[in-house]
């Protein structure tokens, strides 16, 4: 039926019908996500408990043993365990991401110390960094989550030839963080897609299979919740730089 042939009354009824269908779809979507949230919460609890035990005893074993080879093996186990723990946290946050409901708990902390601590969890040869000594007011846990996700993402797509680069600086009362990897780059049409949930744009299938495609989406929502912004620039073939800026706003504390 052509819309331009409908009378005003028929058009109004058609609009009402479409609105009803739209409301029905919204309710169905909400029911699905409520079920997903319950499932994720239960799974996360069941997985995090033994995983925390593995990490705890692993760190104890690594500290106690004098065997260098065993210590290296345990370091790999701990690295993978921490990655799984971060992945689980990202899954938990998916429900908040869908609801656009990320709660922030502000505190004052030193960015250089915080980022240095996170970098120490990775292979030092994989990262070059220059960090400004600054203090900001933000959500400490969420800030660490953003940094960890961005570093993990950069290492995932980086080539084996060059370390990733991290710099921080202050600009117009904003704290700025830039991270650059030297991998395959991101095509211009895909640069906004990387911030969409469950989206990965890598040309490399094996790299797309690592992770759920939610880390960058979470980063964007956390940054936006801080009244900041995050952007991506890429040379298509050889480098990608993510940059986020958040206000240094001590009035929040």
Image (cartoon, rainbow, N blue to C red):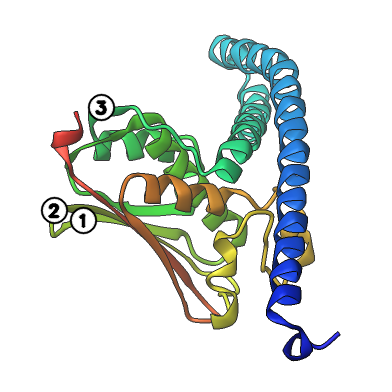
The earlier-in-sequence mark between 2 and 3 is 3
Element on which disc 2 rests:
loop
Quickly name the residue at label 1.
169
Tell me what residue is drawn at x 67 percent, y 23 percent.
Answer: 70
Residue count near mark 1 (Cα–Cα under 10 Å), binned few <14, some 14–19, many ≥20: some
On the image, the x and y values in percent for residue 34 come to 72, 32
Position of the N terminus by quadrant: bottom right
Quickly name the residue at label 2.
173
97 left or right of 221 in image: right
Tell me what residue is drawn at x 18 percent, y 45 percent.
Answer: 248
The earlier-in-sequence mark between 1 and 3 is 3
Relative to 42, say whether 106 is above or below: below
Residue count near mark 2 (Cα–Cα under 10 Å), binned few <14, some 14–19, many ≥20: few
Position of the C terminus by quadrant: top left
Relative to 177, say whether 118 is above or below: above
Quickly name the residue at label 3.
107
Element on which disc 1 rests:
strand
Q: Quadrant of residue 31?
A: top right
174 left or right of 184 in image: left
Q: Give me the disc on residue 208.
A: none
């Amino acid at each position: 039926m052509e819309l331009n042939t409908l009378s005003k009354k028929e058009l109004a009824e058609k609009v009402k019908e479409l609105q009803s269908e739209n409301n029905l779809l919204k309710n169905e979507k909400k029911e699905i996500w409520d079920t997903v949230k319950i499932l994720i919460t239960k799974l996360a609890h069941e997985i995090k408990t033994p995983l925390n035990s593995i990490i705890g005893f692993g760190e104890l074993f690594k500290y106690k043993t004098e065997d260098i080879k065993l210590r290296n093996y345990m370091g790999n186990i701990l690295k993978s365990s921490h990655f799984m723990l971060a992945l689980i946290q990202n899954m938990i946050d998916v429900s908040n991401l869908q609801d656009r409901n990320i709660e922030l708990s502000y505190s004052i902390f030193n960015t250089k110390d915080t980022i240095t601590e996170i970098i120490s969890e990775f292979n030092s040869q994989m990262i070059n960094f220059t960090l400004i000594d600054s203090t900001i007011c933000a959500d400490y846990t969420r800030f660490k989550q953003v940094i960890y996700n961005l570093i993990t993402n950069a290492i995932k797509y980086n080539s084996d030839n060059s370390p990733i680069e991290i710099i921080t600086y202050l600009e117009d009362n904003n704290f700025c963080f830039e991270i650059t990897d030297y991998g395959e780059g991101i095509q211009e049409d895909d640069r906004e897609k990387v911030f969409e949930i469950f989206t990965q744009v890598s040309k490399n299938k094996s790299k797309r299979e690592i992770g759920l495609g939610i880390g960058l989406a979470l980063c964007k929502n956390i940054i936006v919740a801080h009244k900041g912004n995050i952007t991506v620039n890429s040379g298509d073939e050889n480098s990608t730089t993510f940059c986020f800026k958040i206000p240094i706003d001590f009035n929040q504390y």
